[in-house]
Amino acid sequence: MTDVARRHVTDLRRGLLTLHKTLLEWERSGYERQHGRQAPGEWLRIVMADPQLAWLRPLSELIVRIDLLLDADEDDAGQDLVSVLAQARELVVPDEGGSPYARRYHTALQEHPDAVFAHRDVMASLKRPGLRETLH
């Protein structure tokens, strides 16, 4: 992976982390309104196990894939990078009639202004000039 691509992927990762954190905060707020305040350790257990929060797993897994990609050998990174970018583009498409992830993401963007800002930043990162050129 070129230095330019690495910088772009690192920026994308940073944006996805912010988006993930924002979505978790939104979910936590709703969860705690319904179930009461949760200690940090308990919240982590809930995030990992509660089916209500399973929709966030694709985003969590993408961030892990990016971490692995950034640590990978140069030879392994090219095709993985194309796949990671495609997955990132899919995960930032809200769709009230789509997958469980896309429906919940759509709701988050409708209800939580911070999610809109985080979404905007990820979209800007995906549209940044130069990344596409480094893949060819």
Image (spheres, grey):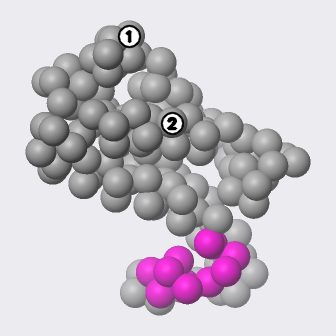
Q: Which residue is mark 2?
A: 86
Residue at the image point whose x is 16% and y is 24% from the top: 2
Q: Position of residue 119 (x, y in %)?
A: 56, 36
Residue nearest the viewer, comparing 32 with 135: 135
Residue at the image point whose x is 45% and y is 60% from the top: 60
Q: Is residue 29 visible?
A: no
Q: Position of residue 28 (x, y in %)?
A: 59, 70
Query: Under tag 2, what secondary structure?
Result: helix
Q: Is residue 65 left or right of residue 85?
A: left
The reply to whether the C-beta atoms of the residues labelled 2 and 1 are less than 8 Å apart is no
- Mark closer to the chain start, 2 or 1: 2
**Which residues fall within the magenta stretch?**
44-54
The label shown at residue 129 is 1
Q: Is residue 8 visible?
A: yes
Residue at the image point whose x is 40% and y is 33% from the top: 82
Q: Position of residue 85 (x, y in %)?
A: 44, 35
Type of the residue with mark 2: Ala
Q: Is residue 31 above or below residue 38?
A: above
**Depth-wise, is mark 2 or mark 1 nearer the camera?**
2
Bin the neighbour count of mark 2 within 10 Å (Cα to Cα): few under 14, some 14-19, many 20 and up: few
